[in-house]
Image (cartoon, rainbow, N blue to C red):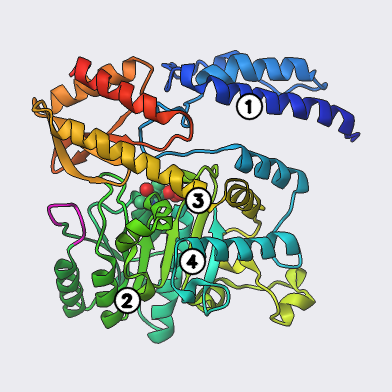
Amino acid sequence: MQIDLDEFRRVGYRAVDLVADYLESLPERAVQPPIVPGSVRAQLPGAAPEAPESWDAILADVESVLLPALSNWQSPGWFAYFPATSAPPAIIGELLSAGFAQQGMLWATSPACTELETQVMDWLAELCDLPGKFRSSGPGGGVIQDSASSGSLVALIAARERIRRRHADVPLERLVAYTSSQTHSSLVKDARIAGFGHIREVDVDDKFAMRPDSLALAMTEDRANGLVPTFVCATIGTTSSGAFDPVRAIATIAERERVWCHVDAAWAGAAGMLPEHRVLFDGLDLVDSYLWNPHKWLMVNFDCTAFWIADRRELVETLSIVPAYLRNAASANDDVIDYRDWQVPLGRRFRALKLWLTLRAFGAEALRTHVREHIELAAELDAWIANDPRFEIVAPRSLALVCFAHRGGDEATQRLVDALNATGRVYLGTTQLRDRLVVRVAIGSPYPVAERVGELRSLIDHLA
Ligand SMILES: *Cc1c(COP(=O)(O)O)cnc(C)c1O
């Protein structure tokens, strides 16, 4: 194999131009272009080429085949799901990461990857004012997981093993994980993978937050039936409506019942950097694990889940297996962190780079302003919708998420969403709250979003 680095320089600059042109064109692009299934594959040959192709031909296909079929998640008109954004610092971080090709499973297989990750996770803990136990100087620490789904899985497995250390012979079928009807579906999947016998949905209140009294009652009932309460997940910012479970009350019950308390703030965690919203995060000092996704709102492209554990020994004791081919002096001396013991896969990407570059190149104040602006825009939109008799706000506005419905009923709501999305200027999703179809508006683009929220308002006014 002959690697041509001069060609890499030439094509690399062109690729950066291509990405910059794409980002520049975002405001003009249809947010979610209408593509019929199979139309992308129909433009691609059935087999890989035997001979090298020219970069001119390859980049031409990127532009003509792929760009028109992208879902433009970073578009200022993207209001669906939750934001999944990026920006130049993270893009450059990914370029460096790919170029360096590190495998950060052990400290010894990449000291740079391991130590930068520890430091950046401590920085992020400081920016979010997390309790001392989550810092690397305390009993716990932070790690970057590939997704919130994986982070929650690791927490469930550690919780399961904590119980099994206490009662060696307890059958997995008797373990119970508690969620609410609003908890993210990944927790259910994770609990299945981890072998929990029961997943119990706790009632929510009129704001869609988990009811601590119902949680306590469920645990008492389950114990009376011979089951073993093992794990509870509280959510700060649920996916459907952005509801905030009362973390302190839930964690207090969990502590009393000796149950693992995990907190999923996948989307809302970015707002933990804002002192004025810290009250939503009250109670983290009592929980066993906590995570949020800089890959949602913080302009660090997927994958980057910030996960903290209160006692890192519980992870390491649960997940550490040391075959002969991974033995090394630094690990044996216990001088270092080996992050492979903190996650499911062995291999690990140098994800800390993109987070480090994002924090350094923007600085914390600009990141706080980014999040704050979206929250203010959502507050204005919420007030405008609430004032219009055609609409109803179905759940209290949560940070930068607004949930509303047409008073004309589900059909009118669906018609409005379809008409809005057909404009190509905005893209919104729906959910169901108390058997009603609801429109979700999640604001989060780093590109000129204020004007587009204004445009969304006129479109809603026009099309309703
Ligand atoms: C997005 C989201 C998840 C899933 O995140 P991944 O990183 O894609 O696994 C989990 N929980 C909540 C509350 C979310 O909003």
Kindly identify the amino acid type of the residue bearing the numbered disc 1: Val
Dot placed on the residue nearer the N-terminal end, 4 or 2: 2
Query: Disc 4 or disc 3, which is closer to the eye?
Result: 3
Question: Quick one: 384 or 146, which is closer to the camera?
Answer: 384
Does ligand 1 reach within 8 Å of label 3's beta carbon? no
Q: Quadrant of residue 282?
A: bottom left
Q: Which residue is mark 2?
A: 259
Kindly identify the amino acid type of the residue bearing the numbered disc 3: Glu
Q: Which residue is mark 3?
A: 365
Q: Please report the bounds of the magenta region as a residue range.
A: 205-210
Residue ID at (70%, 19%) = 59
Label disc, if present, on residue 19 of the rendered structure: 1
Dot placed on the residue nearer the N-terminal end, 2 or 1: 1
Kindly identify the amino acid type of the residue bearing the numbered disc 4: Trp
Residue 324 at what x, y percent from top left? 75, 73
Q: Residues within 10 Å of mark 4 (few under 14, many from 20)?
A: many
Kindly identify the amino acid type of the residue bearing the numbered disc 2: Val
Residue 378 at what x, y percent from top left? 30, 38
The residues bearing labels 1 and 4 have C-alpha atoms spaced at a distance of 33 Å
